Image: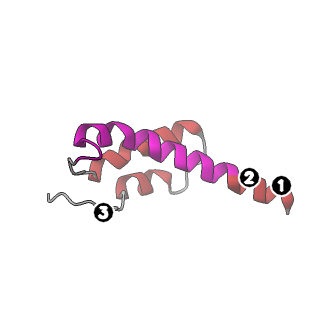
């Protein structure tokens, strides 16, 4: 699998989230599932190992933040 410095679609994480009830545990699982398609580069900004370590946490954090924003929107409406 070629490595490149561009975003990729985490299909395994997407499938896990479809129909799932939003929760921190499902967000963590989705973060781990995102590793399935990840093949980051190693460059002067960050090592491949570091990027693979951070990816699950970054995905879980982004999903949690998105959930918080949705909750705020629903409570205002």
In the image shown, does 8 or 13 lie closer to the viewer?
A: 8
Which mark sits nearer the N-terminus, 3 or 1? Answer: 3
- State yes or no: residue 59 in magenta: yes
Residue positioned most to the front = 44
Q: Where is residue 12 in the image (x, y as percent from the top left)?
A: 36, 53
Number of marks present in the image shown? 3
The range drawn in magenta is: 44-68
Q: Position of residue 9 (x, y in %)?
A: 36, 62
Which mark sits nearer the N-terminus, 3 or 2? Answer: 3
Marks 3 and 2: which is nearer the front? Answer: 3
Q: Where is residue 73 in the image (x, y as percent from the top left)?
A: 77, 59
Q: Which residue is drawn at 64% across and 51% down?
A: 67
Q: In which quarter of the image is residue 32?
A: top left
Q: Distance between the residues labelled 3 and 1?
A: 36 Å
Is disc 3 surrounded by few (<14), some (14 to 19) or many (20+) residues within 10 Å? few
Q: Residue at x 50, y 57 (%)?
A: 18
């Amino acid at each position: 699998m070629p490595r490149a410095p561009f975003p990729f679609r985490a299909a395994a994480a997407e499938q896990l989230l479809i129909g799932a009830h939003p929760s921190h545990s499902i967000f963590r699982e989705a973060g781990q599932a995102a590793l399935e398609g990840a093949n980051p580069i190693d460059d002067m900004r960050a090592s491949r190992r570091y990027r693979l370590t951070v990816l699950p946490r970054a995905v879980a954090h982004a999903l949690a933040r998105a959930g918080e924003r949705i909750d705020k929107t629903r409570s205002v409406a």
